[in-house]
Image (cartoon, rainbow, N blue to C red):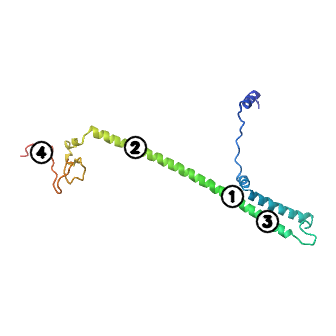
């Protein structure tokens, strides 16, 4: 492997690679650093159990025995186990909470991306609808409404006032209730005099 010292020197002088990326701590390390009570209870329980084992192995129970013969070894064992198990319980609950937080954050990001996709689709649909409306308005400008009276389907002409004008054809003000519509043109096959 060949190392170019000039290039390395230039990078150092230019200030590149000065800031190293901080690695994310492991979940256990993050849980122990975040809450000192968990770390303290694990260390206290472990040290009490360690001293109790050392006392039984090397000193035959002399460390926790007083001068008048009272033995505090079982009490040290109970406090050690209790403290150690308390710390381990807090650690396991913290790890589960971190896992739930990660799952929740993943769910939130998925929901946000879904909402963004849906809003984009809605915008596209609105743009398409607007284009269709513009095309319909352009077609309406090119072909006025009265021109459909000239074609073959003259009897299907929709009046300018809409369908709620009580049967009139082309009358925007409406007609009397019950009055039959009057068509102004005959069919293309009939003669002009009708004899």
Q: Give percent across and percent down for residue 144.
A: 24, 40
Q: Which residue is mark 1?
A: 94
Secondary structure at numbered mark 1: helix
- Mark 2 lies on a secondary structure that is helix
CB under 8 Å between callouts 3 and 2? no
Q: Which circle, 3 or 2, is nearer the viewer?
A: 3
Residue 30 on image: x %, y %:
71, 52
Closest to the camera, between mark 2 and mark 4, is: 2
**SS at mark 4 in the image:** loop
Q: Give coordinates of residue 12: x percent, y percent.
A: 74, 31
Q: Are marks 4 and 1 in contact (CB under 8 Å)?
A: no
Left or right of 194 in this view: 17: right
Residue 178 location, quadrant:
bottom left
Q: Is residue 64 above or below residue 95?
A: below
Mark 3 = which residue? 81
Between circles 4 and 3, the one closer to the viewer is: 3
Question: In the shown orientation, is residue 104 left or right of residue 142?
Answer: right
Q: Which mark sits nearer the N-terminus, 2 or 4?
A: 2
* Residue with the mark numbered 2: 128
Q: Earlier in the sequence, mark 4 or mark 1?
A: 1
In whole angstroms, how far apart are the C-alphas of marks 3 and 2?
Answer: 70 Å
Task: Identify residue for label 4.
Answer: 190
Compute the Cα span from label 2 to label 1: 51 Å
- Earlier sequence position, callout 3 versus callout 2: 3
What's the CA distance linking mark 4 and mark 1? 92 Å
Image depth: mark 2 or mark 1 in front? 1
Query: In the image, what residue occupies the spot 48% across and 49% down?
Result: 118
Tell whether 46 sits left or right of 23: right
Q: Earlier in the sequence, mark 4 or mark 3?
A: 3
């Amino acid at each position: 492997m060949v190392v170019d010292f000039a290039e390395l020197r230039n990078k150092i002088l230019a200030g590149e690679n000065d800031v190293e990326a901080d690695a994310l701590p492991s979940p256990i390390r993050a849980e122990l650093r975040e809450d000192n009570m968990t770390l303290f209870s694990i260390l206290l329980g472990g040290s009490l159990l360690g001293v109790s084992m050392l006392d039984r192995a090397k000193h035959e129970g002399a460390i926790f025995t007083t001068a008048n013969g009272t033995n505090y070894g079982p009490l040290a064992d109970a406090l050690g186990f209790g403290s150690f198990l308390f710390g381990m319980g807090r650690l396991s609950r913290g790890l589960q909470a971190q896992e739930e937080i990660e799952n929740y954050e993943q769910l939130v990001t998925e929901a946000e991306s879904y909402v963004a996709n849906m809003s984009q689709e809605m915008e596209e649909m609105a743009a398409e609808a607007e284009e269709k409306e513009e095309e319909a308005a352009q077609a309406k400008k090119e072909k006025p409404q009265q021109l459909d009276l000239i074609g073959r389907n003259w009897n299907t002409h929709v009046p300018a006032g809409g369908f709620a004008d009580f049967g009139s054809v082309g009358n925007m003000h409406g007609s009397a209730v019950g009055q039959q519509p009057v068509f102004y043109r005959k069919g293309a096959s009939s003669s002009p005099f009708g004899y």
